[in-house]
Image: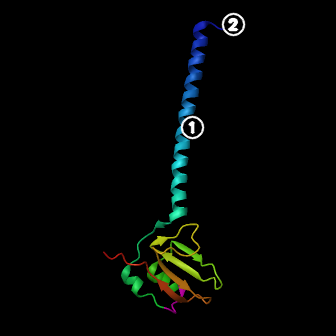
């Protein structure tokens, strides 16, 4: 048979374990929710990436090969294929479009490639004029 002080000790330890577990689970859940919010935001709105060097951007020309663009602008934060009849490949710089965007985001610098892997056109974001 258990004595009264020993049973109180076991109840106290049990309560500490329960409260500690609850606090830990709350913290883990809160951190998981914060991470999910950041991911959801990027999926819905896209996000800013490393800015494009304006001087390098000016040197990108129609007809350039992918490796030449890579040498000027570096690795693209986002590469995709524009949906449609032509299914044109593009590289997106400066801003990455959202997961749900069917085309590159208007906020980014975009290089489009033809089927031979040559630059077919470029698009820069609209200027914010006052």
- Horizontal side of residue 85 vs 49, given as left or right: right
- Residue 40: x percent and y percent? 55, 58
Q: Nearer the viewer, residue 105 or 49?
A: 105
- Residue 95: x percent and y percent? 46, 71
Q: Using the image, determine if residue 24 lies above or below residue 4.
A: below
User: Farthest residue toward the left?
Assistant: 130
Residue displayed at 47% across by 75% down: 106
| Secondary structure of residue under mark 1 | helix
Q: Using the image, determine if residue 73 lies above or below residue 43.
A: below
User: Which residue is label 1 attached to?
Assistant: 25
User: Farthest residue toward the right?
Assistant: 1
Q: Nearer the viewer, residue 19 or 46?
A: 46
Picture disc at residue 37 = none
Residue displayed at 60% across by 17% down: 10
Q: Using the image, determine if residue 38 lies above or below residue 111.
A: above
Is-magenta flag for residue 11?
A: no
Q: Earlier in the sequence, mark 1 or mark 2?
A: 2
Magenta stretch in the rendered image: 62-66
Quadrant holding the N terminus:
top right
Q: Is residue 75 visible?
A: no
User: Farthest residue toward the front?
Assistant: 130
Picture disc at residue 1 = 2
């Amino acid at each position: 048979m258990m004595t009264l002080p020993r049973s109180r000790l076991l109840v106290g330890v049990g309560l500490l374990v329960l409260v500690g577990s609850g606090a830990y689970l709350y913290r883990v859940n809160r951190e998981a929710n914060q991470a999910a919010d950041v991911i959801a935001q990027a999926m819905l709105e896209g996000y800013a990436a490393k800015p494009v060097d304006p001087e390098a951007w000016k040197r990108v020309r129609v007809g350039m090969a992918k490796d030449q663009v890579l040498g000027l602008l570096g690795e693209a934060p986002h590469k995709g294929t524009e949906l449609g009849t032509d299914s044109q490949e593009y590289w997106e710089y400066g801003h990455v479009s959202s997961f749900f965007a069917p085309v590159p985001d208007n906020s980014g610098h975009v290089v489009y490639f033809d089927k031979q892997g040559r630059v077919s056109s470029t698009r820069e974001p609209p200027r914010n004029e006052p």
